[in-house]
């Protein structure tokens, strides 16, 4: 009977926990369904469309032009054009443009450093001084979370970085016309 009483006690604890979770879900209401980790299938594309419209409005362009600049593939986004210039300028301006894209299209406030490097590498931008270039725009345009050489380092936009990102996106779209 000792085991049976322990099982009953655990069942009671689990039931109480479930009640607390339901209470939290009620408090959060509809915002819980918009959390990035909860997004699947149609809701991802629906949120991407809403974000695309919002971004298009911010840069005073159409959603079709935003589509030409950013490719969305599930939970990842890739920029199709990068700013021109040397590696340093491309890294500076490309990073803020990508962070804006991730923020509006994927509802992701941060980008892992690995993802940024992957995108720059796909455009054949040299990565030798990548971290050094990003340090130059920290904390003016971006904030770094994590240690410099860590695999878990992420980057986030500042308000000034978001404004700069809008300008870079405008320039990229103007250059394409």
Image (cartoon, rainbow, N blue to C red):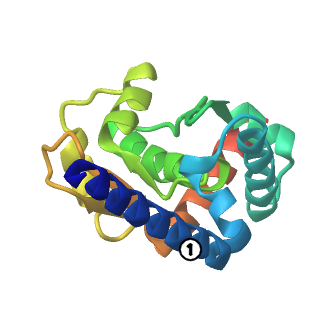
* Residue at screen point 77% across, 60% down: 54
Q: Establish if 4 lies above or below 119.
A: below
Residue position marked by numbered label 1 in the rendering = 24
Residue 155 is situated, as x and y percent measured from the top left of the image, at 35, 55
Q: Residue placed farthest to the front in the image? A: 1
Q: Establish if 70 lies above or below 56.
A: above
Q: Is residue 121 left or right of residue 162?
A: left
Q: Establish if 77 lies above or below 112.
A: above
Q: Is residue 53 left or right of residue 154?
A: right
Q: Quadrant of the C terminus?
A: top right
* Residue at screen point 62% across, 69% down: 25
Q: Establish if 152 lies above or below 118.
A: below
* Residue at screen point 31% across, 35% down: 114
Quadrant in the rendering for residue 19: bottom right
Quadrant in the rendering for residue 81: top right
- Seen from the viewer's position, the closer of residues 92 and 75 is 75
- Seen from the viewer's position, the closer of residues 88 and 67 is 67
Label 1 crowd (10 A; few <14 / some 14-19 / many >=20)? few
* Residue at screen point 81% across, 61% down: 57
Q: Is residue 51 left or right of residue 162?
A: right
Residue 45 is situated, as x and y percent measured from the top left of the image, at 76, 39
- Seen from the viewer's position, the closer of residues 89 and 63 is 63
Under circle 1, the secondary element is helix
- Residue 15 seen anywhere in this rendered image of the structure: yes
- Residue 86 seen anywhere in this rendered image of the structure: no
User: What count of labels does the image hold?
Assistant: 1
Quadrant in the rendering for residue 27: bottom right
Residue 142 is situated, as x and y percent measured from the top left of the image, at 37, 63
């Amino acid at each position: 009977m000792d085991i049976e009483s322990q099982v009953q006690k655990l069942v009671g604890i689990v039931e109480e926990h479930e009640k607390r979770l339901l209470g939290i879900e009620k408090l959060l209401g509809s915002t819980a369904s918009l959390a990035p980790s909860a997004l699947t299938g149609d809701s991802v594309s629906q949120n991407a469309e809403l974000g695309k419209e919002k971004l298009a409005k911010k840069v005073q362009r159409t959603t079709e032009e935003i589509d030409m600049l950013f490719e969305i593939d599930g939970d990842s986004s890739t920029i199709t054009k990068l700013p021109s210039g040397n590696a340093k300028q491309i890294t500076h301006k490309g990073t803020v443009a990508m962070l804006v894209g991730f923020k509006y299209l994927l509802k992701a406030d941060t980008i892992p450093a690995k993802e940024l490097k992957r995108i720059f590498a796909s455009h054949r931008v040299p990565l030798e001084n990548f971290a050094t270039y990003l340090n130059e725009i920290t904390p003016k345009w971006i904030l770094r979370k994590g240690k410099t050489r860590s695999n878990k380092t992420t980057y986030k936009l500042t308000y000034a970085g978001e404004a700069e990102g809008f300008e870079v996106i405008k320039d990229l779209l103007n250059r394409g016309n």
